[in-house]
Image (tube, rainbow, N blue to C red):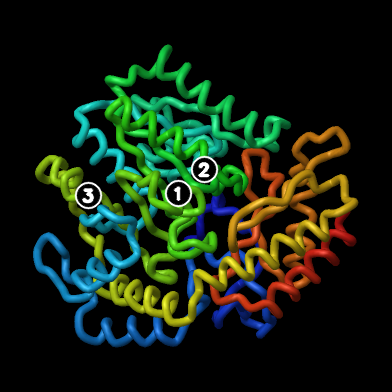
């Protein structure tokens, strides 16, 4: 009898029957606080009534209109609405289905627009699992092992991960920028470099935020060498970090704008939809036939995305992510106080994590796994991440309340007591 691939390892034993807001319910009716949000996807919570209504209404009139064959109104409306929240100048959009597809579309565009081959990514990056995206991913060998040869033209530079190096942020940033310059002088000629590709906060790499000086340094070097700056907002975008786009924490006055921005995950509250945005002057340099796809810009997904944008604006969910994220990270730091097993608590908005270490300060995957599973057994769904799997992350839907944050923190403290 057919079954799911044995390689699909489940992070929890839950068989979900329905979802509502920040909660999932299994087939026995047990309620779980879902602080995974489908890995940052259900931005407006499970089955938000406005998103459900928009999808149902659209499914009753047009489910799919392939967008290089015919246009449809949800596609055009979504494009217009995204123009209200995208950084200034990013006025041309291409839609696909997943983050990996959007990443590969962005890289293809950068290579076409510059006529160059090389892409610089940063240590700890996660940009996807498809063949091109896997070559750009360095958060764990499991995403790229056994695939070789991977896509050529990829160079890897350090990310300013202060805790990893055991330095302060300034020292880590000095090192990362210095090593990037060294890379460009020794292995990745600037004249061959199409783009720098960066996550504002490392996702699978351990929820490590970048910083203003590092992104400014990338922008300056991209301009100096004629390369493009691509910002991967797949996980950090659409309000997740307490700003609409994660990079805006470090570029609030628009001094550092991306040339290409990638969005997915929370864009449509669970429906498959991704996009890249760029200035028309860049987008029109894509070669004919290089952009397309059967399902990209699906009508139902676009309708759900429009409803998502409505909910985020009307319910002030970006502000809520900032407020509840501050409450969450403060609570996690309080829970970590005096616990040598937790080496660091970090993040932005509702994208926060705790890193577990052993007595010698080395990554402790086993401890992270025990605490994560203990939390699940107590009704709080969490995931791990990081190169060594020793980071437990919390990414609740943006609709989470203060009371639900406090409930999760109570479960977390109990799980720490039981597992450590």
Element under disc 2: helix
Numbered mark located on residue 279 in the image: 3
Location of residue 135 by image quarter = top left
Q: Earlier in the sequence, mark 3 or mark 2?
A: 2
In front of the other: 59 or 78? 78
21 to the left or right of 67: right
Numbered mark located on residue 212 in the image: 2
Q: Residue 309's x, y, as percent?
A: 38, 74
Identified at 30% across, 39% down, the residue is 107
Element under disc 1: loop
Q: Which residue is mark 1?
A: 251
Q: Is residue 407 visible?
A: yes
278 to the left or right of 330: left
Q: Residue 298's x, y, as percent?
A: 25, 68
Asked if the residue at tag 2 contacts the one at tag 1, i.e. Cβ–Cβ closer than 8 Å, the answer is yes
Q: Residues within 10 Å of mark 1 (few under 14, many from 20)?
A: some
Q: What is the spatial separation of the Cα atoms under label 1 and label 2, in whole angstroms?
A: 7 Å
Q: Earlier in the sequence, mark 1 or mark 2?
A: 2
161 to the left or right of 70: right
Q: Residues within 10 Å of mark 2 (few under 14, many from 20)?
A: some
Numbered mark located on residue 114 in the image: none
Residue 299 position (above or below residue 136): below
Q: Residue 212's x, y, as percent?
A: 52, 43
Identified at 55% across, 43% down, the residue is 211
Q: Earlier in the sequence, mark 3 or mark 1?
A: 1
Q: Is residue 39 visible?
A: no
In front of the other: 248 or 238? 248
Q: Nearer the viewer, mark 3 or mark 2?
A: 2
419 to the left or right of 60: right
Q: What is the spatial separation of the Cα atoms under label 3 and label 2, in whole angstroms?
A: 23 Å
Element under disc 3: loop
Identified at 78% across, 34% down, the residue is 362
């Amino acid at each position: 009898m057919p079954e799911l691939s044995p390689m699909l390892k489940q992070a929890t034993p839950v068989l979900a029957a329905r979802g509502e807001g920040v909660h999932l319910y299994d087939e026995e009716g047990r309620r779980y606080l879902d602080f995974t949000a489908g890995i940052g996807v259900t931005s407006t919570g499970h089955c938000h009534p406005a998103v459900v209504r928009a999808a149902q209404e659209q499914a009753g009139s047009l489910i799919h209109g392939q967008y290089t064959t015919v246009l449809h109104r949800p596609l055009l409306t979504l494009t217009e609405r995204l123009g209200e929240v995208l950084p200034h100048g990013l006025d041309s959009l291409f839609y696909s289905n997943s983050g990996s597809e959007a990443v590969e579309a962005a890289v293809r565009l950068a290579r076409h627009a510059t006529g160059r081959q090389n892409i610089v990514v940063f240590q700890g990056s996660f940009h996807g699992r498809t063949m091109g995206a896997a070559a750009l991913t360095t958060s764990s060998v499991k995403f790229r092992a056994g695939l070789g040869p991977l896509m050529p033209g990829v160079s890897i530079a350090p990310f300013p991960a202060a805790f990893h190096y055991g330095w302060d942020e300034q020292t880590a940033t000095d090192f990362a920028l210095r090593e990037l310059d060294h890379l460009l002088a020794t292995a990745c000629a600037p004249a061959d470099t199409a783009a720098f590709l960066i996550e504002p906060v490392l996702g699978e790499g351990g929820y490590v935020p970048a910083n203003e000086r590092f992104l400014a340094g990338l922008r300056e070097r991209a301009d100096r060498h004629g390369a493009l700056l691509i910002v991967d907002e797949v996980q950090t975008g659409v309000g997740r970090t307490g700003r609409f786009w994660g990079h805006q924490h470090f570029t609030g006055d628009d001094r550092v704008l991306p040339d290409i921005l990638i969005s997915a995950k929370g864009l449509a509250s669970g429906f498959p939809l991704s996009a890249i945005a760029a200035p028309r002057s860049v987008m029109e340099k894509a070669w004919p036939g290089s952009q397309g796809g059967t399902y990209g810009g699906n009508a139902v997904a676009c309708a759900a995305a429009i409803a998502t944008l409505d909910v985020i604006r009307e319910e002030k969910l970006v502000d809520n992510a900032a407020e509840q994220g501050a409450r969450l990270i403060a609570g996690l730091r309080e829970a970590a106080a005096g616990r040598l097993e937790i080496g660091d608590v970090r993040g932005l908005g509702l994208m926060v994590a705790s890193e577990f270490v052993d007595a010698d300060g080395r990554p402790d995957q086993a401890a992270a796994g025990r605490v994560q599973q203990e939390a699940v057994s107590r009704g709080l769904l969490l995931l791990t991440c990081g190169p060594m799997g020793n980071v437990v992350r919390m990414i609740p839907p943006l609709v989470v309340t203060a009371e639900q944050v406090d409930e999760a923190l109570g479960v977390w403290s109990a799980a720490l007591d039981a597992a450590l």
